[in-house]
Amino acid sequence: MALTMRTIGGRDYTIYDDGQHVGRIHYAPERLPPRWVWKLLPTGNGLPITGAALGLEGAQADLAAAWDACKKRP
């Protein structure tokens, strides 16, 4: 199933996979250059996976790729 985004205000989104909350994407204007920051909730090893992109579409693609990789782990 495809990931879905729900706005939680302004440029801040929660990410769901089949109704399960799996992460967040938000705009970080305080960073130079400003960027979209994403985070997957703790995975099997208990550590969150994070990243950043200059555009929202890039952040969405990066988070989706990381989530797919997490789901493929044993």
Image (cartoon, rainbow, N blue to C red):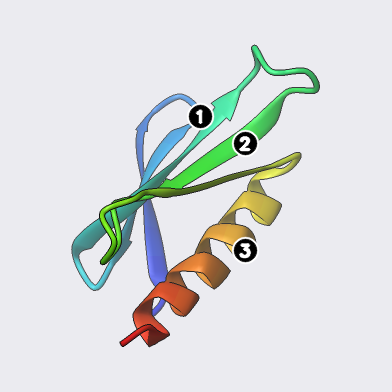
Q: Is residue 73 above or below residue 66?
A: below
Element type at mark 1: loop
Tell me the crowding category of disc 1: few under 14, some 14 to 19, or many 20 or more residues within 10 angstroms, Cα based: few
Name the amino acid, label 2.
Trp
Mark 3 vs mark 1, foreground winner is: 3
- Name the quadrant containing residue 14: top left
Tag 3: residue type?
A: Ala
Figure quadrant of residue 44: bottom left
- Residue at figure coordinates x 48%, y 77% from the top left: 69
Residue 11: assigned label? 1
Mark in the foreground, 1 or 2? 2
What percent of the width, then of the height, locates residue 9? 37, 26
Q: Which residue is mark 2?
A: 36
Q: Which residue is mark 3?
A: 61
Residue at disc 2, secondary structure: strand
Task: Estimate how packed mark 3 is, as few (under 14), some (14 to 19) or many (20 or more) residues with alpha carbons within 10 Å.
Answer: few
Which of the two discs, 3 and 1, labels the residue nearer the N terminus? 1
Q: Left or right: 56 with respect to 14?
A: right
Q: Please give the name of the residue rendered at 26% of the width and 54% of the height, measured from the top-left corner.
A: 46
Check contact, mark 2 vs mark 3: CB within 8 A: no
